[in-house]
Image: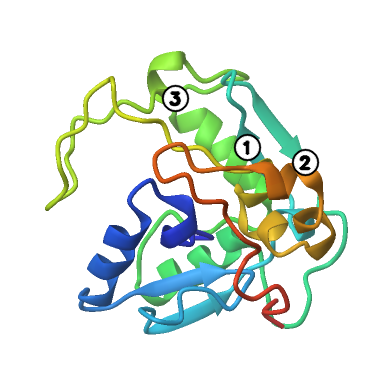
Amino acid sequence: LNNEPEFDSAVGEHTAAGLEHAQMVVTLSPFKANLAFSDVLLPIAPFSETPGTFVNAEGRIQSFHAVVKPRGEARPAWKVLRVLANLLGLSGFDFETAQEVLAHVRGTDSVATHVSAERLSNVSTTAIAGSAPRDASATPVTASIYQLDGLTRRATSLQLTADARGAVHAATGVRPGPHPSLEEVAA
């Protein structure tokens, strides 16, 4: 869901290789992404074209409205997931608005306005098959602020800034380049 493993994962090449061997991969993305290993690409709207809710790094719940209508056949991700669930005959996916989804989550998950630090923890007890165990002294993954999500990776003007050009991966010493295809916005 709106993820490009080779850019969004600390072990991106390993993750992408694993997905190439998966029985089926469905990508939901606002971009023509993951084509090398996806069997199905479903267009979703980027966050700016859909209402929704994020939990920020402090655990605060922040809701927002769409700035513009989605382009082409793209729909908000929650609507795509709702339709898929309905086609699969799953119950509990009868929401008509993003506000209904948020109200349901708040009602069933005891989330009011804040998510606890424990629930936001990045600590995982699950190992990735085939990967070396990681300890607290492992080199952190670093990236330019303009490499952190698909939308900014494709923003040519941001990729031309000094901030984008100055980033160096701590472990490899390699400077990330602009996204391979800045004009691949899904229509």
The residue at which mark 2 appears reads as: 64
Q: Earlier in the sequence, mark 2 or mark 1?
A: 1
Residue at (70% x, 65% y) in the render: 154
Q: Position of residue 58 (x, y in %)?
A: 59, 18
Q: Is residue 142 above or below residue 120?
A: below
The residue at which mark 3 appears reads as: 120
Q: Residue furthest front?
A: 173
Residue at (68% x, 75% y) in the render: 74
Amino acid type of disc 1?
Phe
Amino acid type of disc 2?
Phe
The residue at which mark 1 appears reads as: 54
Amino acid type of disc 3?
Leu
- Specify few, some or many for label 3: CA neighbours under 10 Å numbering under 14, 14-19, or 20 or more: few
Q: Is residue 48 above or below residue 154?
A: above
Contact between labelled residues 1 and 2, with CB atoms less than 8 Å apart: yes
- Specify few, some or many for label 1: CA neighbours under 10 Å numbering under 14, 14-19, or 20 or more: few
Local secondary structure at mark 1: strand
Q: Position of residue 12 (x, y in %)?
A: 37, 56
Q: Quadrant of residue 69?
A: bottom right
Q: Earlier in the sequence, mark 3 or mark 1?
A: 1
Q: Is residue 38 above or below residue 97?
A: below
Q: Position of residue 144 (x, y in %)?
A: 63, 43
Local secondary structure at mark 2: strand
Q: CA distance from mark 2 to mark 1?
A: 8 Å
Q: CA distance from mark 3 to mark 1?
A: 12 Å
Q: Is residue 122 left or right of residue 104?
A: left
Depth check: give the residue in front, 32 or 119.
32
Residue at (56% x, 21% y) in the render: 59
Q: Position of residue 44 (x, y in %)?
A: 62, 69
